[in-house]
Image (cartoon, rainbow, N blue to C red):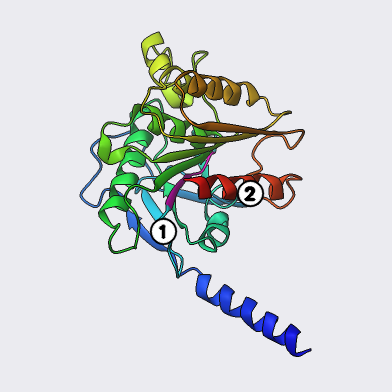
Amino acid sequence: MKKILVVFGMVCVSIMLNAQESPLELPLWPNGAPNNNGLTGEERVENLWGGIAVSNVSTPAIIVHRPAKPNGMAIIACPGGGFTQLAMSHEGNDMASWLNAQGITLAVLKYRMPNGHPEVPLSDAEQAVRLLRQHASEWQLNSDKIGIMGASAGGHLAATLATIYSGASTRPDFQIVLYPVINVMNGSMALLGANPSDELKKKYSPDLQVTDNTPPAFITVSSDDRLVRHSILYYQSLLEKQIPACLHTYPSGGHGWGFRDNFLYKRQWTEELEKWLRTL
């Protein structure tokens, strides 16, 4: 009984030491954004997909979840939502406790929708990277361990940032993409607008933009997801440039599972990601 109590006490202490602090919401552009997507009206918040969904974002921000004992690594999470809204819960904030327990700081990106202006969410993602590096000392972060993560449309944003970042200050050090949209050569009106040029479609197809400086990638998808081809295309492009990458596919699960407990392979993908992050 004494041994059991000792072990229980150690577990409780460990949980307390790794407990996350209250999240901090920090505006991306306190002095105004440098671009505009043409959307007007108030931001909308609703219950959708079993959690909180946000649309018509007018004041982009990062919601920063800090662990009590940071290990220097930070991940910026870009929720998906079909380029029209953001699944802030299961593709964002719900991952905080899990990542904080590993000492990883999580910053969930509440980014503006493209509305045919793909440079708008990309600029928000770049600004998020800048902000984390600016606060690196304050938040006990390593400026060389800032990664980008995204799911579905957010996976497209993450991969886009990883391939066409504007400079060293906004280059992520690694990327994590869950069931991502990748190639948009067949068009995406919400992202690119009506009748986009082939040049624009190529620019925003990350599988066509991989370079020798693209950061390492962790990719995961379900085999019965219609976007599985996107993940394979991206993985192949990374390998062709000899970029360290891994692709995990699971037999079933469809699309949009994120951090949901009802995804049959949640334990597998989270454990694989934990192991991969330790290699960085």
**Residue 54 belongs to the span the image colors magenta:** no
Q: Which residues are magenta?
A: 74-80
Q: Nearer the viewer, residue 189 or 256?
A: 256
To which residue does mark 2 refer? 270
Residue in the image at 37% along x and 11% along y: 199
Disc 2 element: helix
Q: Nearer the viewer, residue 60 or 220?
A: 220
Q: Position of residue 45 (x, y in %)?
A: 51, 51
Q: Position of residue 26 (x, y in %)?
A: 33, 57
Q: Nearer the viewer, mark 1 or mark 2?
A: 2
Residue in the image at 34% along x and 47% along y: 144
Q: Which mark is residue 238?
A: none
Residue in the image at 71% along x and 53% along y: 261
In the rendered image, the quadrant that contains the N terminus is bottom right
To which residue does mark 1 refer? 64
Crowd class of label 2 (few under 14; some 14 to 19; many from 20; radius 10 Å): some
Q: Position of residue 137 (x, y in %)?
A: 28, 61
Q: Main secondary structure of the magenta part?
A: strand
Residue 179 sits above or below residue 79 on the image? above
Location of residue 38 (image quadrant): top left
Question: Is residue 246 something one can see in this rendering?
Answer: yes
Disc 1 element: strand
Going by the numbered disc 2, the residue's amino acid type is: Thr
**Residue 76 belongs to the span the image colors magenta:** yes
Residue in the image at 62% along x and 80% along y: 10
Location of residue 178 (image quadrant): top right
Crowd class of label 1 (few under 14; some 14 to 19; many from 20; radius 10 Å): many
Q: Position of residue 138 (x, y in %)?
A: 29, 64
Question: Is residue 183 something one can see in this rendering?
Answer: no
